[in-house]
Image (tube, coloured by chain):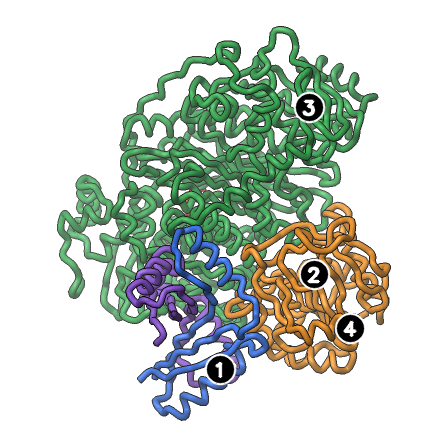
Chain colours: A orange, B green, C blue, D purple
Amino acid sequence: MKAAVLVFPGSNRERDVAKALTRATGHAPAMVWHAETSLPEGTDLVVLPGGFSYGDYLRCGAIAARAPVMDAVRAHAERGGLALGICNGFQILVESGLLPGILTRNKDLRFICKSQHLKVERADTAFTRTYAEGQIIEVCCAHGEGNYFADPETLERLEGEGRVAFRYCAADGSLGGTANANGSVNDIAGIYSEKLNVLGMMPHPENLVDAAVGGTDGLALFSGLAKAA
Amino acid sequence: MSSAEPAITPELVASHGLKPDEYDRILKLIGREPSFTELGIFSAMWNEHCSYKSSKIWLKTLPVTGPKVIQGPGENAGVVDIGDGDAVVFKMESHNHPSFIEPYQGAATGVGGILRDVFTMGARPVAALNALRFGAPDHPRTRHLVSGVVAGVGGYGNSFGVPTVGGLVGFHPRYDGNILVNAMAVGLAKADAIFYAKATGVGLPVVYLGSKTGRDGIHGATMASAEFDEASEEKRPTVQVGDPFAEKLLLEACLELMASGSVVAIQDMGAAGLTCSAVEMGAKGDLGIRLDLETVPVRETGMTAYEMMLSESQERMLMVLHPEKEDVARAIFTKWGLDFAVVGHTTDDLRFKVFLNGELKADLPIKELGDQAPEYDRPHVETPKAAEIVASSVAAPLDTREALMALVGSPELSSRRWVWEQYDHIILGETVQKPGGDAAVVRVEGGPKGLALTADVTPRYCEADPFEGGKQAVAEAWRNLTAVGAKPLAVTDNLNFGNPEKPEIMGQLVGCIKGIGEACRALDFPVVSGNVSLYNETQGRAILPTPTIGAVGLLDDVAKSATIAIKREGEAVIVIGDAKGWIGRSCWLWLVAGREEGAPPPVDLSVEKRNGDFVRSMISAGVATAVHDVSDGGLAVAVAEMALAGRIGARLYAPPAGATPHGWWFGEDQARYVVTTSEQNAATVIDAAAQAGITATRIGTTGGDRLIPGEEAPILLDELREAHEGWFPRYMAGPAVDA
Amino acid sequence: MKARVTVTLKTGVLDPQGKAIEGALGSLGVAGVESVRQGKLFDVELKTSDPAEAEATLKAMCERLLANTVIESYRYEIAG
Amino acid sequence: MKARVTVTLKTGVLDPQGKAIEGALGSLGVAGVESVRQGKLFDVELKTSDPAEAEATLKAMCERLLANTVIESYRYEIAG
Ligand SMILES: Nc1ncnc2c1ncn2[C@@H]1O[C@H](COP(=O)(O)OP(=O)(O)O)[C@@H](O)[C@H]1O
Ligand SMILES: [Mg+2]
């Protein structure tokens, strides 16, 4: 597995995700500056990390989505390469058109940082192969604009094609209510691209890779990816 | 010397916050009338905020050294050795007045300023804390201020990318017109790669880094030292807007630059921006500085020398560079999209000379500008001692159950989750203990060691008895660190008081500093940095004396840190420490009996140390399964918080014969901890304590879904939780008020 | 040359900020407000003084950056 | 009755958003932009049809909630 982590001005979880990848794959990923026009030779997985790229000014992820390196990411994804966008990375993926919909302000307008349970919708993708279908995992949220929205047709397509990756849920797996703190439509916490090779998700698996620091439910995602190539 | 600048009149001098005798001092020092720009420079350097003129002689009495102290007060932040070549760098600073005027931006730029202090020293920030004091919840502005300040603290820290892991929030009508926003930042560096403000070498380039200069916050530093009045709401446009994005870039660029070996000296531009930073770099290094202001990157046209010298635009730094590294340095800053400009150079004449387009605007002796600042031994009177209030002399208006429900659901003691869930407390992936416990625990990357962090003070104690209150603030911070199993290392303080020109207020400041000094000496807990904020008064009424103590401790192995959560059913609940049921100035007396009276609980520092050392040893031996110090609200509140955190109840014995129930359950006697341990270990713990001369009393057993205080009515944890968690969100959801 | 760009949410797109403002106005006692929708505006200073060139620049700015046309519409106006 | 409120930063107040947008336009190759300042707009639907009453409501909204008059100025316009 050759992984590359993109670094935009204002990214701030690039070191976190690099640590998670290192732990899962045994070697450090390449860190790729936003001004580059290509990904390192042989990149299997490109990760768009969390943060506040360009301060999240204008719209979250909007400016980063137009960075030079994003053309390379688009080409990589078209070739079937794996791409993972977490939090701000997810926002960048939707702004760049690699994933549908949009992430807007949390419903009560406040930033939310808390432990969060997710339901794994399917376990047959490169990202979730080490989970079981329907498994409830505990990761954490830390975002101000994670309220996923898409028009009804898009939503129908996402649901129909099994492209919802994770949903917010309570510890017992129940959906709705306070378990969905940001107001996302259909409790959506993450979605796949058509070919299931691009995943965008709001919560942070990379901060849950260590038993001493909150748990390891996030590590499985990275160890699954480690086996993907 | 100057063209078209205002004439220096007594009114102009006064409007710069300089007293007539201070102006005389200026005349004597330079032997002529100052130019307008020079007057501005003096007002910035000699105001309370930068010169510490009222507090300096007292701050000198604090213990500031220790075997692990690498850098004490006098630099941007304190530095302490934590072994393995690592050092922790930390400081706390206030942004009180700006936050009252514009809560979001005031708090945000406060966080930005303190982060800059830490990374200026070469440290990567790894944690932030904040101590917030607001007026009464029912004051018409409070809700707006809470919401803005919390959003501002979060907005800046979250975007910058530092976990905000702790702090405190308090409410009291004495802060109605003067809220307190004290922000603390903690960073990690290599002990042999710390950067300082002291410049060395003549003829070296002085470089400006970061964002452009605008007309922001001109007179901000003066505002921070002026008493508030109705009119100050008019001075509004001096508020600065923070740009956490620019600061994040500045952090990365500075760390990259430092690693490249280009930096001789570096100083952030905080209060009084370019003036303070340039003078400090020169004065500390016994060098002169020449600035050519037309080279300063600006974002507004037509700025005068006066405006440039006093601007408090954020996210800026000043640096002295190794000349041969200029290209390397410039390339790094260009890469990060930041301004980089050579704005002057060091000289050997010990003068601070400022030119604009070749015209000399200021020419001042650089050493004297800092060193000759006025220093006052202001008259002070001691706060009269309050009488001790004996618990049995006060009738209890509520029974134990009702009183406990009222306390855990009060503005003072309810859960702060609503606040800290708006702070990213997990970023960097090293947060072992998040907000909500006694101290936050952050692992040092790679582990197993970690830092314990806390901020604390009990202003109502300080008001009643500044000396005991000062001691107590330090003792409680020390206890918080101890309660997670850490060895307390050092403190930073933020001394928030009213107008020091009033002898009673000065007496509070002196008393608190003496108390802090005594406690820090007794506990081997040196003060390595800090900040003073005076003139926190509105219409003649001062805030409660509030010397916030920020403290850092070291854990050898974060896996062994203790938490407050009860872990298992059927364990022994033990109190460490003696109690006589001290009710004076307690939360119970204040919030349940409605009286803010009496002497605060005294702090016996030798008992404090002995009890704390004992608790720490039980934690490292793995015997203590949960630990919580006893503070606001006393024993009952401490056990309630442990039960809520662990979702396991406890049955507690009735108060011992002779004890008054409210004194027993809610007394705030110091140097105490509640500890749980397995049934098998209980006797061993009590014996070991006895051998060390410590009182350890079993008070009950864990288990069940309720808390049962002796013979009194049990309280379901669900009800307790609803009261505890409910207040803050309910309060904040209340009606909006005018901004 | 000066211009103003306004970006507004398309109808049907949820506007949590507008909703929050409506709620806050109610509790402030400001009655008589049916609904609020929040948008953005950009005051742009252009280098050119040629209206056609200005228009082209503005259109490019909006399409390529200022508006997310999935959920937003934009308009621009060149100041006289 | 419809109205539009615009809220802009006072001159001299730092606008990090505008600055970031300027930078982004540059690197996107949209040339010809001197400066950008970002503001907010609010499209308000009022219950009344009396212009004086509408004006009073709008003023109250702006002063008390929509604008942070420490750093922002506001204007409103009642739509025809
Ligand atoms: N209450 C205090 N206790 C100890 N040191 C203090 C205190 N107040 C200020 N200092 C020290 O004085 C120096 C100047 O502080 P300050 O003016 O706040 O720094 P800055 O330049 O960051 O604004 C710092 O080294 C600070 O640590
Ligand atoms: Mg400093």
In the rendered image, the vertical position of residue B537 relative to residue A221, given as above or below: above
Are the residues under marks 2 and 1 on the same chain? no
Q: Distance from label 1 to label 3 (Cα)? A: 66 Å
Residue, disc 1 = C61
Relative horizontal placement of residue B245, taking residue A17 as reference (left or right): left
- The label on residue A160 is 4
1 vs 3, front mark? 3
Q: Quadrant of residue B557?
A: top right
Kind of residue at disc 3:
Pro
Protein chain holding label 2: A
Badge 3: chain ID = B
Q: Amino acid at mark 1?
A: Met
In terms of sequence position, does the residue under pointer 4 or pointer 2 come before the other? 4
Q: Quadrant of the N terminus of chain B?
A: bottom left
The alpha-carbon separation of the residues under discs 2 and 1 comes to: 34 Å
Dot 1 falls on which chain?
C
Q: Within the displayed image, which quadrant is ligand 1 positioned in? A: top left
